[in-house]
Image: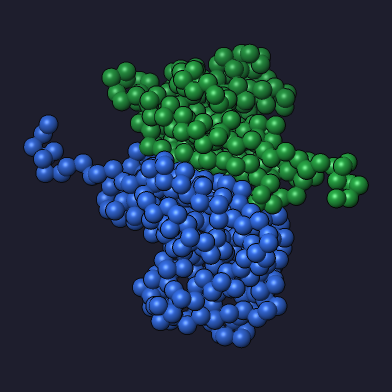
Chain colours: A blue, B green
Amino acid sequence: MSALDGLAPPPAAPLTVGILAGMGPAAGVDFARLFVRASENWLRSHGRPVLDQSFPEHWIAQVPVVDRTRALHDPQAPQPLDGLALALQRLAALGARAVAMSCNTAHAWHAALQERVASVELLHIADETAAELGRRGIGRAALLATQGTYRMGLYDRAFAAHGIQCVLPSEAARGWLMQGIYDGVKAGDMALARRRFAQAGQQVREAHGDVALVMACTEIPLALPDAPEARDWTLIDPSDILAVALANRAYG
Amino acid sequence: MSALDGLAPPPAAPLTVGILAGMGPAAGVDFARLFVRASENWLRSHGRPVLDQSFPEHWIAQVPVVDRTRALHDPQAPQPLDGLALALQRLAALGARAVAMSCNTAHAWHAALQERVASVELLHIADETAAELGRRGIGRAALLATQGTYRMGLYDRAFAAHGIQCVLPSEAARGWLMQGIYDGVKAGDMALARRRFAQAGQQVREAHGDVALVMACTEIPLALPDAPEARDWTLIDPSDILAVALANRAYG
């Protein structure tokens, strides 16, 4: 042991965290990619070496959860709460202290899940996004989301708490978003997804001007940034913001 | 219930599978991406709809495992077997019936892990790769890997079993590969990784002609395919082959 060891004790191991995903699986993997990138950025910005062993232990549950938007629309349809709670309990049993859900619509069950599994901190994608918009000084933003997310007002309360005005697409544009999500990204047709998401963005910008667009469904950032129309748009990715928040929790 | 229901019973749910990863974390996420793509391709090729719910449940363990190459080189260094076995047991407890390890060097402990956790099928990346090369009629291939993978002869037995001749890079080229893996991809310097991997590939091709290059370290496919020199090379990705094998196991 050298004299320097006493001056620079090794940093404590980061906390184990979890990712509750599979909604859909491609978006879940992309969220894990954002989390690994956020962890790497954290290490760099803190002058720590980027080694396999310096990343937080994290477990990714890619579980087949029933359709969230349909469950919100129709109380008789299969409901996702029990399946989500089981996966969250398993992540907690694996040692996860904080968990992020890589699906906006699934946050309809956020409070119920947090109540059922109190031993983990279940991050909230809208709260994290609104706080980040506040930090960036953005006072008005448009919400691109599923019908389920609009119906439950997922972002409304969080935006209001941070004094951010929320702008919504027209009914037609909401239909294009749903088509881009379901027939586009989830079905693997990325060209269709790009067209439909860009159409919706254009409708919002024609109606409300050059407003920041919050891509509040994990499928949208997989296609919209690649649409040529979106090149100069201000796109906000709540998944990326959530991934950074999860890395910050892991490193304490 | 219509008459057709009797003719076309709903397909059985796919098996739960696991991915033992974190070696490094970026490569682990990329393996998960390949698995999701392989599952999607399986669904399409079997005429099944691509829905969130038609993917196999899969759990990804991104655990901080001690350095595998160092452990092979120095028996006094921290050894990864206990950590890998614990993660594999946890994947088994989550219901995984088959597991893939997204690290070539970690396969040095494949037999020991399979013996400790007999309830899952632990796929073997070199066996799957050799079988696939055989199916493609490739009789000679060069191995781009870590020093640990060369030292333990991971691919030698599998290639021999399928009558495939194995070509090795020079000592200098092996050093470039290690630099591209550790100082390049694992440290986030992709430009360095591309240069070093391309140098190694060029050495092999100068010595052995237009031979297929097996990228037998999960970090190499994250950079080499983007090197301009590699545009016309035949690159084989064992991770992709392993991901397809895991999807095939899941769908039975």
A14 w.r.t. A245: above or below: above
Total number of numbered discs in the rendering: 0
- Spot occupied by residue B122 in the image (x, y as percentages of width and height): 55, 25
Q: Nearer the viewer, residue B229 or A178?
A: A178
Residue at horizontal 38 percent and vertical 75 percent from the top: A134
Question: On the rendered structure, is A74 left or right of B191?
Answer: right
Query: Residue B247: horizontal and vertical position, in percent?
Result: 65, 36
Q: Looking at the picture, how far across and down is residue A123, in whole percent?
A: 42, 59
Between residue B142 and residue A116, name the one nearer to us: A116
**Relative height, residue B12 to residue A189 (above, below):** above
Q: Position of residue A188 (x, y in %)?
A: 69, 54
Q: Residue at x 47, y 39 (%)?
A: B61
Residue in the image at 67% along x and 26% along y = B132
Question: Can residue B198 be seen in this snapshot?
Answer: no
Q: Is residue A33 left or right of residue A12?
A: right
Is B154 or B23 nearer to us in this picture? B23
Q: Taking the image as drawn, is residue A75 in sight?
A: yes
Q: Residue A12's image quarter?
A: top left
Q: In the drawing, does residue B4 fall left or right of residue A186?
A: right
Hey, which residue is sitting farthest left in the picture?
Answer: A3
Residue B135, above or below A225: above
Is the N terminus of chain A in the top left, top right, bottom left or bottom right quadrant?
top left
The residue positioned 62% from the left and 57% from the top of the image is A79
Asked where in the image residue A196 lies, by quadrant, the reply is: bottom right
The image shows residue B176, relative to residue B148, as above or below, that is below
